[in-house]
Amino acid sequence: MSSFSRLLSTISKKVVKPFSPTPSTQKIHKFSLLDQCMGNFYMPLVLFYPKHQLEQGPKQLSKLLENSFSKALTYHQPWVGSLRDNATIHCDDTGAEFFDVEVNCSMNQVVHRPDLTFPPGLSWKNVPHANDGGRLSVAQLSHFDCGGMSISVCMSHKVGDARSAFSFLKDWATITRQYPNDELSCPSYYVQDSLMPSLPDGPLKFPVVVEPNEEESVEFEKRFFLSESNIRALKALIVDDPSSIVQNPTTTEVVSAIVYKCAAIAGANISNGNDSSSQMVLVSDLRKTIPPSIKSTSTIGNILTAFSTPIYNLEDLRLPKLVADIRKSKHELSTRDNFKENKWISEMLEYANKINTGIEDDQSYRQKSSCHDVYRCSSICNIPFQDLDFGWGRPTRASIASTPFSNMIYLMNTQDQNKGIEVFINLNQQQMSIFEQDKEFLQFASPVGDNHVHEDKEKLYCMEAF
């Protein structure tokens, strides 16, 4: 994206504070145990709006969005506070960064390469320390020379997950639509440590550091689109197989299964005779299981867990089996209290214990854990980013920045006029060259936009999930 950076010119960069100060009774935000396990890195989300939807000029839109942003922040004090330690945020109204930029190209040139719509160097990166000017939330308005505009945010994952970021954007959109009225009928609720309390002996202390493998430091992200009709055909293919157990597979089940299968086969082809076994780890939103006494329309925090498939050898990678195993793992997840028995937390506690007691160092632990390939899949298909209306209609496209995490798969819904699922997958260059030519995958998927190459060897202080 370096060549594209020359197309940017900054109109303004400022710190926006909440319209109303945080009450003294709400100055401390307590992290849940899962929040403490989460890395403090930015989630980058962007919405695109074409010129024909915008009734005001760039200056008027920028002023409106800056003012409504300030009013929205009043309801979201943790995202404009200061990280005090791994257990608390001091809601001191430090504020959020707000960029207003001009992009000297049309929106169509960027819509499938959205990295340009985020402040340089922030997407997915570790949030800088507050003493170095780091903010837990950042917004950018990008005005294209065709008259279109994008609204992007980088929100700290330490505060909340993708559903939480959506809740913030929804509140911002609502306030913008009804401006200058800043009342929210159903404001978002921060669960803090009410669901997964801290350990009695204090906050977790461990290095959550992920470094790109030196041998796989050049990563390629590609995006693929699966139309609704192709997804129906994929489901039919799986259901009609004589070995199929699941007769009503979901879209997420079948899409994640075929992407993982083809990626794992591509990985096995470059393993040079080494162990080609692999596994997929998926993320599950726990909001539907929140107790009624706490449940709110919009709950904010990291309210997640993880579940995984068995470890497969190459000959086990059959779509009906993968879908059946995903369904079985999801069912097992539903039979337990995932706030008391959270797999994500238990694995991070095990990791922290081994590192802090000196049983293993970080490098040896990760080497031991990498005896088979792990593919991580996170679906945000059920989060309606495409419905976010700031007063000029729904976005023509919602997207995320390209991810630097190896073997990472994201699934996201696409807009109404071209319904389906967009797949974001990041593999090393050699593996990607095989994956993108997989004939079975290309029966159902078509490539979107350009390749994204990652050569960033900077340490990423984060968990590999969204």
Image (cartoon, helix red, strand yellow):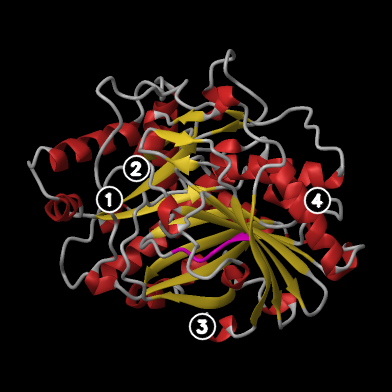
Under mark 1, the amino acid is Tyr
**Up-down relation of residue 72 to residue 228 (above or below):** above
Q: Are marks 1 and 2 in contact (CB under 8 Å)?
A: yes
Residue at mark 3: 2
Q: Secondary structure at mark 3?
A: helix
Residue extent of the magenta highlight: 399-403
Q: Position of residue 302 (x, y in %)?
A: 48, 36
Under mark 4, the amino acid is Phe
Tell me the residue at 80%/51% (across/down): 390
**Up-down relation of residue 190 to residue 212 (above or below):** above
Quarter of the image where one finds residue 174: top right
- For residue 251, side relative to residue 416 (left or right): left
Dominant secondary structure of the residues highlighted in magenta in the image: loop
Q: Which mark is on residue 390?
A: 4
Q: In this view of the protein, which residue sits in the foreground, 307 or 157?
A: 157
Residue at mark 1: 312
Under mark 3, the amino acid is Ser
